[in-house]
Amino acid sequence: MSSKVYSTGYLSEKLELMEQHSQDFIKFLILPMERKMSLLKQDDQLAVTRSIKEGEQNLGFQTIQVDHQQAEVFIVEQTVHAEEGIPMSCQYYLLSDGHLAKRIQVGSPGCCIITKMPILREEDEIEPRPVFEKKPLVWEEDMELYSKFLDRKEELRLGHASYLRQHPEAHALISDFLLFLLLRQPEDVVTFAAEFFGPFDPWRPSSPALGSSHRPNPFRSLEPEGDARSGAA
């Protein structure tokens, strides 16, 4: 069981109650119930109005004639109980999509019925989720990625230029490398560069004091720096 309470009030400038409306909704497992109470000040007196509305009852299906054709409707009966007087019941005849086709107040000779059959709304079809195939990424054609590439390229260029300005000895080292490269013209430039700059690597293992026929690898090991340091120690 669950319940909800709503209340609204109106006060005068002297904080006197002029009007108040409260609504209680109690939801039982079998039959919900709704209670309303209104207070209205009239000539220094408060007029109280109370009403109790019980839940709707399902009366099943029935076939009625609407606009010279037969239509199947679903019937729901709703009963409102007042503190004074007899309860009032109404029956609602609903089409398959929720359209109200007929309304009858129980005990009354009159009724309301539609004269033209409405266009019934069909059940919404749930479309399957779209499937997007993975496309090969060509970053040169992607404007966002290409823009990030240019920004990163410019950032690295400025960083390298700043480093060279702060370390003038790097200019002399690069000039020596280019000079040796032009003089010797090696077939494998990458290995030649690794052998040239290798002695300047602080993590490179020291060469043996005595000459050896075993030529050390000029490239840095792919092991993590921590393992390389421990091995060197």
Image: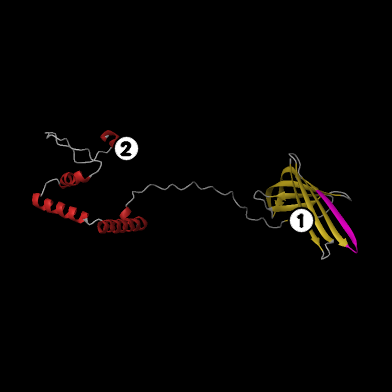
What secondary structure is the magenta-colored segment mainly? Answer: strand
Describe residue 195's horizontal placement relative to residue 134 as left or right: left
Question: What is the quadrant of the C terminus in the image?
Answer: top left
Label 1 sits on residue: 112
Q: Which residues are magenta?
A: 42-52
Residue type highlighted by circle 2: Gly
What percent of the width, then of the height, locates residue 161? Answer: 26, 58
- For the N terminus, which image quadrant? top right
Q: Is residue 56 above or below residue 141?
A: above
Label 2 or label 1, whichever lies nearer to me, is: 2
Mark 2 vs mark 1, CA separation in Å: 88 Å
Q: Is residue 174 magenta?
A: no
Badge 1 local density, few (<14 within 10 Å), some, or many (20+)? Answer: few
The residue that disc 2 covers is 226
In depth, the one of 190 and 174 nearer the eye is 174
Residue under the point 9% across and 51% down: 183
Q: Secondary structure at mark 2?
A: helix
Name the residue: 84% across, 52% down. Answer: 50
